[in-house]
Image (cartoon, rainbow, N blue to C red):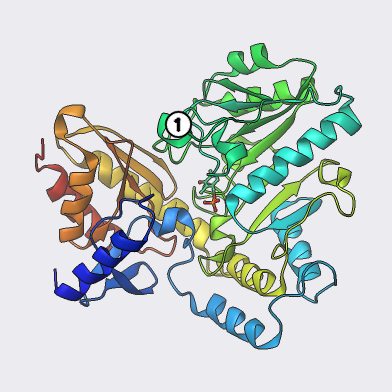
């Protein structure tokens, strides 16, 4: 590494809170599936900023929409109307088949907002006694980093020494419909769940799980809240991951790729009167629904559909998954994925996944380990067959190495 790269890393370490442990690469440019470091080395981005840059880095049409809007009007606050919000509402509702939209910024804010809204719905519509609302969540969930959310995480790193936490959450195993049935009480207002657990290591529930979940929620008047912040907007080869299950959530959370990585934009979408319980003054955000965010999100949704990225995620995802399954390496314990949300889980004896990610960096691929043994692979949805094959070749040589 050159001295300037070491300077960037050292300066970050000196002044920054050490709440991340980045791989030793300093990026300065991106285009499509590629990113370049400060020394001009090119890498295939197999993380896509945790699926926020699904449309590819610096997508020209999203960029143009952002620049155009930034010249005209960026922020009005919701104290006034702006000429982008209505169009954003109309387009996201049409795309997802939702009736109501609440615009926010980060993913965690969308989750927090949904928790507030389903509790309010529980008290005002379902008739739960005030203060008694329960929300069911899953073990190994990841819904963000705010205090409310980490309070119902099961990951000790995420929770330790951040309490006390808010009550009102029950934790059940993921993929176990009987556990949901047992956990539901008359005070249950919602079941909050990821269609595929992303940060947990791309954990896909058993077939039929969500059909049963949908039936249980409907039968017990419990709102099904699907956190599609990572799985949504084409990542799994369908617009929403719920479509693989043939179900519809009552509340859907989107973020990440909703802006194509240009700007934090998230949204709570609801198919019923959940968001209808919110009245003026009861919830808000200075930046939520601002014209710049709306213009960026509108362009991000448009290119996703117009440029066939969702279909491409299905096609290339299948090619990538098959290629990974064909790699004969005794380091590999399991390969799994849906669309371009893929993971390679290593045997414990193979050594830490981090070492493999560092080796991949040397071969021009940036991927991220999760939970010691898993390499997650999630390139932008614009990846081509040639690029998938290029990545597979390098993955095959890296995974047959032994870093134990
Ligand atoms: C990333 C993520 C979040 C949190 O989004 P932020 O924008 O980082 O707050 C919530 N839920 C899921 C499933 C995620 O992957």
| Residue 389 as seen in the image, left or right of residue 95 | left
**Image coordinates for residue 55, horizontal then vertical, percent:** 49, 65
- Which quadrant does the N terminus fall into? bottom left
**Image coordinates for residue 277, horizontal then vertical, percent:** 88, 43
Q: Is residue 242 above or below residue 187?
A: below
Q: Is residue 92 above or below residue 185?
A: below
Tag count: 1
In the picture, residue 127 is in which quadrant?
Answer: top right
Viewer-nearest residue: 208 or 380:
380
| Residue 397 as seen in the image, left or right of residue 301 | left
**Residue 317 visible to an observer of this rendering:** yes
Viewer-nearest residue: 187 or 258:
187
Query: At numbered mark 1, what does the secondary structure look like: helix, strand or loop?
Result: loop
| Residue 219 as seen in the image, left or right of residue 176 | right
In the picture, residue 24 is in which quadrant?
Answer: bottom left
Q: Residue at x 19, y 52 (%)?
A: 358
Q: Residue at x 52, y 57 (%)?
A: 310
Q: Residue at x 78, y 64 (%)?
A: 90
- Which quadrant does the C terminus fall into? top left
Residue, disc 1: 160
**Image coordinates for residue 217, horizontal then vertical, percent:** 73, 25
In the picture, residue 218 is in which quadrant?
Answer: top right
Q: Is residue 154 above or below residue 87?
A: above
- Ligand 1 is within 8 Å of the C-beta of the residue at disc 1: no
Viewer-nearest residue: 369 or 77:
77
Mark 1, other Cα within 10 Å: few <14 / some 14–19 / many ≥20:
few
**Image coordinates for residue 380, horizontal then vertical, percent:** 42, 61
């Amino acid at each position: 590494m050159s001295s300037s790269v070491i300077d960037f890393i050292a300066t970050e370490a000196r002044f920054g809170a050490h709440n991340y442990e980045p791989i030793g690469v300093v990026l300065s440019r991106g285009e499509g599936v590629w990113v370049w470091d400060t020394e001009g080395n090119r890498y295939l981005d197999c993380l896509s900023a945790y699926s926020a840059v699904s449309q590819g880095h610096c997508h020209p049409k999203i960029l143009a929409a952002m620049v155009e809007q930034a010249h005209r009007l960026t922020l009005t606050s919701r104290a006034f109307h702006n000429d982008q919000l209505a169009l954003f509402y109309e387009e996201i509702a049409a795309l997802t088949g939702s009736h109501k939209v609440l615009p926010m910024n980060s993913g965690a804010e969308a989750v927090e907002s949904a928790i507030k809204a389903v509790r309010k719905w529980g008290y005002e519509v379902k008739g739960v006694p005030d203060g008694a609302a329960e929300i069911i969540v899953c073990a190994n969930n990841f819904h963000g980093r705010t205090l409310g959310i980490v309070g119902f995480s099961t990951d000790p790193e995420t929770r330790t020494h951040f309490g006390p936490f808010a009550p009102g959450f029950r934790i059940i195993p993921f993929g176990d419909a009987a556990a949901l049935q047992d956990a539901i009480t008359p005070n249950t207002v919602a079941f909050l769940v990821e269609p595929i657990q992303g940060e947990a290591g791309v954990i896909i529930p058993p077939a039929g799980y969500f059909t049963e979940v949908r039936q249980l929620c409907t039968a017990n008047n419990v709102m099904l809240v699907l956190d599609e912040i990572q799985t949504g907007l084409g990542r799994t080869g369908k617009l929403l991951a719920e479509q693989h299950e043939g179900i519809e959530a009552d509340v859907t959370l989107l973020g990440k790729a909703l802006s194509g990585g240009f700007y934090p934009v998230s949204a709570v979408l609801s198919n019923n009167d959940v968001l209808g319980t919110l009245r003026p003054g009861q919830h808000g955000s200075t930046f939520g629904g601002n014209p710049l965010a709306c213009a960026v999100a509108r362009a991000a949704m448009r290119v996703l559909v117009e440029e066939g990225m969702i279909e491409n995620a299905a096609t290339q995802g299948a090619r990538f998954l098959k290629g990974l399954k064909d790699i004969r390496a005794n380091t590999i314990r399991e390969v799994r994925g849906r669309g371009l949300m893929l993971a390679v889980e290593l045997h414990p004896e193979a050594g830490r996944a981090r070492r493999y990610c560092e080796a991949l960096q040397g071969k021009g691929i940036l991927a991220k380990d999760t939970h010691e043994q898993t390499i997650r692979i999630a390139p932008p949805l614009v990846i081509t067959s040639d690029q998938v094959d290029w990545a597979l070749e390098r993955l095959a040589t890296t995974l047959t190495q032994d870093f134990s």
